[in-house]
Image (cartoon, rainbow, N blue to C red):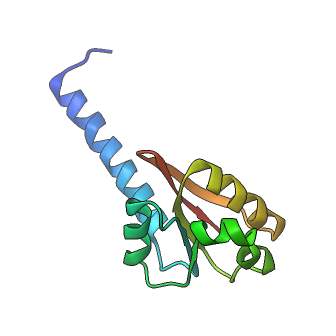
Amino acid sequence: MKLSRRSLIKVGAVASLAASGTARAMAGAAPALVIYDSRLPESRAFAALIPAPRIDVAQEDARFWASLRAAAPKGRIAGLTRWSDLVVVRGYLEEQGRRLRHEMRQGMLFRWDMG
């Protein structure tokens, strides 16, 4: 395959459309629940942008995730957390029949959706 400027631009356009489609799919309608970590500025900012009930990882660690273990609300659950917190949340939500729908790394954190 001959690499030309035109083919390189086409590949870049397709990649940007695919990325924006993923971002739109993750954004979608407002989630039923947001999980964030108040100790992390990026995660706090993420939670502040979404008008939904919230679970703060910083408080749930001390409560052994009682809020999430009880029963998560119906609908999509969105989060921006560290990997270790995602693993814990995913375990509790999978016990309730939820599945990881999207996951994307954002710097040192992970943006994810479960439904």
Point 48% across, 68% down: residue: 38
Residue 29 horizontal/vertical position (percent):
47, 78
Residue 78 horizontal/vertical position (percent):
55, 68
Residue 3 falls in image quadrant: top left
Residue 62 falls in image quadrant: bottom right
Residue 113 falls in image quadrant: bottom right
- 107 relative to 36, above or below: above
- 28 relative to 5, above or below: below
Task: Check the picture and name the quadrant holding the N terminus.
Answer: top left
Residue 76 horizontal/vertical position (percent):
60, 74
Residue 79 horizontal/vertical position (percent):
54, 65
Q: Is residue 20 left or right of residue 25?
A: left
Point 48% across, 80% down: residue: 30
Q: Is residue 109 left or right of residue 59?
A: left
Farthest front residue? Answer: 62
Point 68% across, 83% down: residue: 73
Q: Nearer the viewer, residue 34 or 39?
A: 39
How many discs mark residues in the rendered view? 0
Q: Nearer the viewer, residue 109 or 76?
A: 109
Task: Check the picture and name the quadrant holding the C terminus.
Answer: bottom right
Q: Which of 59 and 7 is in front in this view?
A: 59
